[in-house]
Amino acid sequence: MEIKKVVVIGSGTMGSGIAAHLCNANVPVTLLDLTTEISQKAKERIQKSRPPLLIDKTKIDNIRVGNINDDFDVVKDADWVVEAVVERIDIKHNIYEKIFKFRKSGAIVSSNTSSIPIKILSEKLTDTEKKDFCITHFFNPVRYMGLLEIVKNENNDLGKINSLKKFCELELGKGAIVCNDTPGFLGNRIGVFAMQVAMTEAFRMKLTIEEADAVFGRPMGIPKTGVFGLYDLIGIDLMADVLKSFIKELPKSDPFQIVAKEIPLITKLINTGYTGRKGKGGFYRMNKQNNQKILEAINLESGEYSTTKKIDLGIETVNLKVLINRNDKYGEYAWSVISKIIKYASSLVPGITDKFNDIDEAMRLGFNWTMGPFEMLKAIGVKNFFSRIDAFENNKFLENLSKTEDENFYGERQKYTDIETLGKIKPKAIKVDKNKSAEIYRFKDFNIVEFTTKACALNYDSMDALKNATDKPLIIINESMQFSAGVNLKYTMDFADKGDFKSIEKFIKYFQETCKHLKYSDHPVISAPSGLVLGGGEEVAIQSNFVVSHTNIVMGLVETGVGLVPAGGGCKEVLWRWLQTDEAKKDPDYAPLKVFNIIGYAKTATSTVEAVPLKFLRPEDKKVMNRNSLFEVSRKLIEENKKFVPPKECKFNLSGKSVKEKMIKVLEKLYNEKVILDHGMEVGKELANVLSGGNTNIDKTLTEDDLYKLELESFMKLIETKKTQERIKHTLATGKPLVN
């Protein structure tokens, strides 16, 4: 069946998020609520949302609004009706009665519930109606979260369920995983259990919350919030309600019952309004001292707050073997948490799903884990796991695995999708070359480079990998959440602190050489970005021959925020693109001034739609909704470009002093208005020097190397200043820019 029209009933957070994302997929959608005023206000919230729910805000009117009394007739034309009303079963039953009375024959009806079993939702439906009814559990925010759980019932038309799955995968870009009707379904069942284990073990072992979050975070391949930070983000009171629901629904023998027991400190926090970030604070709170904001953490024993302490485990990458083998409390905590997660997840197979790696994908897509429980088991090693584990009664999965101790038990990843994903293709590589920052996967007809550093930050090793992989067509793509957040600033500052600016200059030159090598390679180079594509990350992408981009990118040349100018060819490449416009052909100063504004303000695009007008992406660059499709589309481009010819080198005619003076006037105005301060003025002048062409005139032709040289000179002038170093250190410490 085809899905051409959708109706969403309920315009709250989830309903409006689903409607917005259908709009992103160019699917006509009608949003209904009790009154048209309510649904209209939801539409206005969608338009203003931050981060933006819409990829293209100009398409907002593709969302029609109405009410369930006057406008319910729209259901007659819908191919799919999504219920997203409040979690009250009586209200839902009333809505279903009305939907099935109006809907056209065969139309899919689904609920977005996160907690009510489908058995209860569908208890008043006929067997025929049940065939077309399921749960489609989207995760919030809908645009950005990859997981969609489709919960089936025993009466479902499986062909129709698969059609819905395919639509959600290809058109909405979701990792659509079909699962059974069990409490919490797939993601929340494991995810909430993992949170509770991490928390209860921290209490038991008398760790500080900073210590627990330092372990149950990036070292385990889990988002940096950790468990207590995530509790605060979700809301401590909301988590308490979620736990009550699990306690009610799950049998008394389920291990969840133990970790979900009420904790007096949490009860006290809720009762006193400390419900997390939305309240007065939670496990963490922001306190003011001497007009400064100080982050404080609660003591799990005393309940008193004190200034947070940074815990450095000395671990840069995810290595579970190293983590659990530490001979300290952190290693003990990691093993206790990981082993319990593995035991619990494996005990649910085949109850919640008969494909155990679907659980892993649910954790990747819905909770942003880099590996799920079974991948954790694989990483630890099967024999190693069983040598340390205690009893595992009533766990058929572990019982069977213990008999074989098969280290290769995992098999193929991502079975839930037919798409040829990066995760599926990597194990098929003929050879893998590795260094500390990147991996080269070598195949017969192409290579893949994947960055492996934190935030995929770039350094010498990253450049080495890129250079060494251009002997064949190359795809630059990452399984991690980011393409690249740019050059590793800490790496740069380590040299600056020693006064070793020659090493910095050497690296920037090598970065430039690498980017130029990518652009003019004998074989096509394809960048397939998702997530952050910032600074040096964008410079790699825009100097590739082709780009296949996920729609949910954040792209920009943001170097001015840390007191620098883009020096890997970013200024040069964006300037060249603007010089090709009709306006630039009439006015030689048009392009430099335009780029000065874009880079000077460190403008970013939050979607592919926003990236095109800024010239960060070209109209012909491929854009895909499903992140899993990045590799498949990139591979197809290689097939289509077997007769690839490298581009001709760019030439520049810039007006030099005259356009630079125009830029300086802009800076002086901003300075007088105190938008920028002294160092902002200096950074702006260096950017102006690069984009004007330096000591040139309109009759003089500059090469790309000339522009690279200007970028390097300005970069080096700035990195040697104390104020730029202050900016970099401040950003590294806080994640925020410093105005100085």
Image (cartoon, rainbow, N blue to C red):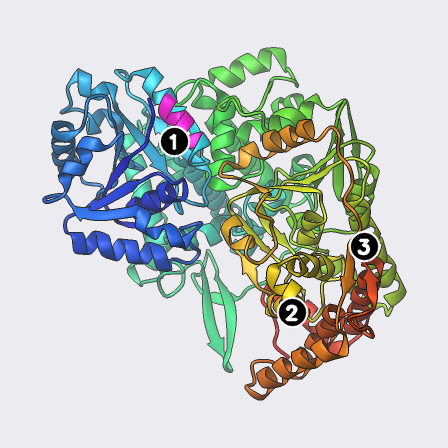
SS of the residue at dot 3? helix
Residue under the image location 60 percent in, 49 percent down: 618
Per the image, the residue denoted by label 1 is 149
Q: Main secondary structure of the magenta part?
A: helix
Q: Which residues are magenta?
A: 163-169
Residue under the image location 25 percent in, 15 percent down: 155
Instruction: State the image coordinates of residue 216 (x, y, percent, origin top left).
Output: 55, 45
Instruction: State the image coordinates of residue 9 (x, y, percent, origin top left).
Output: 22, 41
Quarter containing the N terminus: top left
| Mark toward the start of the polypeptide (1 vs 2) | 1
Q: Establish if 688 lies above or below 665.
A: above
Identify which residue, 608 or 649, lies in the foreground. Answer: 649
* Amino acid type assigned to the residue bearing label 1 in the image: Glu
Per the image, the residue denoted by label 2 is 587
Per the image, the residue denoted by label 3 is 512
Q: CA distance from mark 1 to mark 3?
A: 44 Å
